[in-house]
Amino acid sequence: MRHAFQALWAIVQRELLKFIRQYGRLASALVRPLLWLAVFAAGFRNVFGVAVNEPYDTYIAYDVYIGPGLVGMVLLFNGMQSSLAMVYDREMGLMRLLLTAPLPRWWILFAKLAATATLSLVQAAAFVIVAWGLGTELPVIGPQTPQVLLATVSAALMLGALGLLLSVHIKQLENFAGTMNFVIFPMYFMSTALYPLWKLEESGAEWVWWIARFNPFTHAVEWMRFALYGKDPGLAPWVVLGTLGLCFALAAWGYDPQRGFGALTKRGPGGPA
């Protein structure tokens, strides 16, 4: 156990030190959601009216509504960026070296996932602090704080596990941008990050409404949103935790050195290739 936790801390520490050396990484992670908060929310403040609906007890400003969605944006983009880092580590040979350690393969992957979630939480905390400075106060501190932390950590782990799973199937760095465009933007825009589900249904966009209902990112955002107000999130935690378990299990299966990367075995008419 001591050796396993030493390996966990070593991997998390490596990612943290790498993050600290990349001075522009935190700034670039904050620019995107802050632009949405300062520009998009301000421009559409009077266009999108958010009616009294759970978990809110009164009318709220639009920037307050999209706050949890923008936290989810930070977690989503860092989770996907971790996928890029995994592909890079695999091409450089680091993942092969890690997976030869005398530890279960799933534990090594869990350590990478924990490092990704830690970086996501650091960036999310920085965003909340800056959002407070811009006048958008999210009720993070209070009796509901443990619920908020649980929801945010679970969302960070789920999105990190999704990035881990995607890294199994992205064979080269050149393929990363195209793959991410088919993951990040659909997950974000077809969710409740920017607008409530009832508005999608009311507008007649039924197919978007159905996709948003089954989008795991929707449930991650809703869990955080309900946790901020100490309300019952319903099935959202089960969807998030179930997606986390499924993505991580498939990633652990895919990172078999004889299956997931590098030493792929293909059989054709001439036998093993």
Image (cartoon, rainbow, N blue to C red):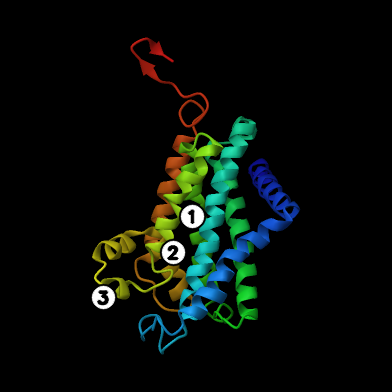
The CA span between labels 3 and 1 is: 29 Å
Residue at mark 2: 220
Say whether disc 3 or disc 1 marks the residue closer to the N-terminus. 1
- Foreground: 155 or 190? 190
The CA span between labels 2 and 1 is: 9 Å
Q: Residues within 10 Å of mark 1 (few under 14, many from 20)?
A: many
Badge nearest the viewer, 3 or 2 = 3
Residue type at mark 2?
Answer: Ala
Query: Residue 186 occupies which quadrant of the picture?
Result: bottom left
Residue at mark 3: 202
Residue 142 drawn at (x, y percent):
57, 81
Query: Residue 39 occupies which quadrant of the picture?
Result: bottom right
Residue at mark 1: 159
Q: Please identify the residue farthest to the right as the structure is shown.
A: 21
Which residue does the image show at 57% across and 76% down from the upper left?
A: 38
Left or right of 55: which side holds 133? Answer: right
Q: Is residue 125 above or below residue 100?
A: below
Which residue does the image show at 43% across and 71% down from the upper left?
A: 194
